[in-house]
Structure formats: C-alpha cells, structure tokens
Image (cartoon, rainbow, N blue to C red):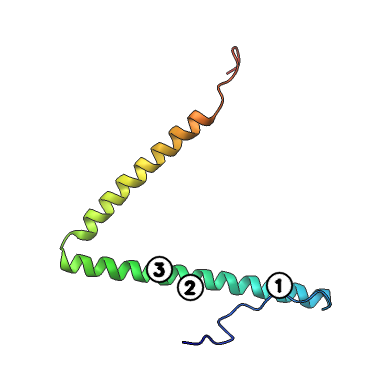
Amino acid sequence: MPQSKLDEPEPPPLADEPESSSVLNFEQWIEALKSSDRLFYNMMAIEVWSIAKTMDTLFPGFWNRFMTNRRFALQEFIKQKKAAQSQAMPSPPDGEP
C-alpha cells in the first residue's frame, strides 16, 4: 500500500534556505518523528493486548500467569544489573569510606 506524503517526515532543509525557516522545518521534522514514534508504540500496545486477549480466551488464566512470570523475570533482571554494577565499581582505598 503506497504511503501518502503526509505520513513521511519532511527532510531537513537545505543549507541555502533562510535560518528561521530551517529552524521551523527542523522542529516540524522532529515533531513528526515524535508523533510517528508514539503511533508505533501505541500500535505495538494494541497488538500485545490483542494477543494477550486471544490467549486468555483460548487458555483461561494465561494473562495472569504471563504477568506473574514477567514480574519475576524483571526482578531477576534488576538483581543481575545491581550485582554487575556493584562488581564494576572499584572499592575505595583503605581508610576512606
């Protein structure tokens, strides 16, 4: 399906354009990228929700088990990160706190 010109962010202006219009175009371009990024994450959220809803319909309790496993995995990830950071930090010289 061909995309319309409105869906694509406008490229930054050429160097020979006046400064004020280039700043405005650049800000518009950044805002278009931010909007596109928000849309992308919203679409991903809808897809995840639809998969979870389908799985919960096919296997009752799926979502609850999924969230429990996710919480456990996140806690383990945080523990591993803290352990890696504490190992990476040099110990203070003798006599210093």
Tell me the residue at 46%/87% (across/down). Answer: 1
Residue, disc 1:
26
Identified by mark 3, the residue type is Met
Residue 32: x, y in percent?
Answer: 60, 75
Measure the C-alpha gap from mark 1 to mark 2.
20 Å
Tell me the residue at 54%/29% (across/down). Answer: 89
Badge 2: how crowded within 10 Å, few (<14), some, or many (20+)? few
Mark 2 and mark 3 lie on one chain; the one further toward the N terminus is 2
In the image shown, does 81 or 95 lie closer to the viewer? 81
| SS class, disc 1 | helix
Residue 97: x, y in percent?
Answer: 57, 18
Residue 17: x, y in percent?
Answer: 82, 78
| SS class, disc 3 | helix
Identified by mark 2, the residue type is Leu
Residue, disc 2:
39
Identified by mark 1, the residue type is Phe
Q: Quadrant of residue 31?
A: bottom right
Locate residue 15 relative to residue 42 in the image: left or right.
right
Measure the C-alpha gap from mark 2 to mark 3.
9 Å
As drawn, 38 above or below 90: below
As drawn, 25 above or below 51: below
Residue, disc 3:
44
Tell me the residue at 75%/72% (across/down). Answer: 23
| SS class, disc 2 | helix
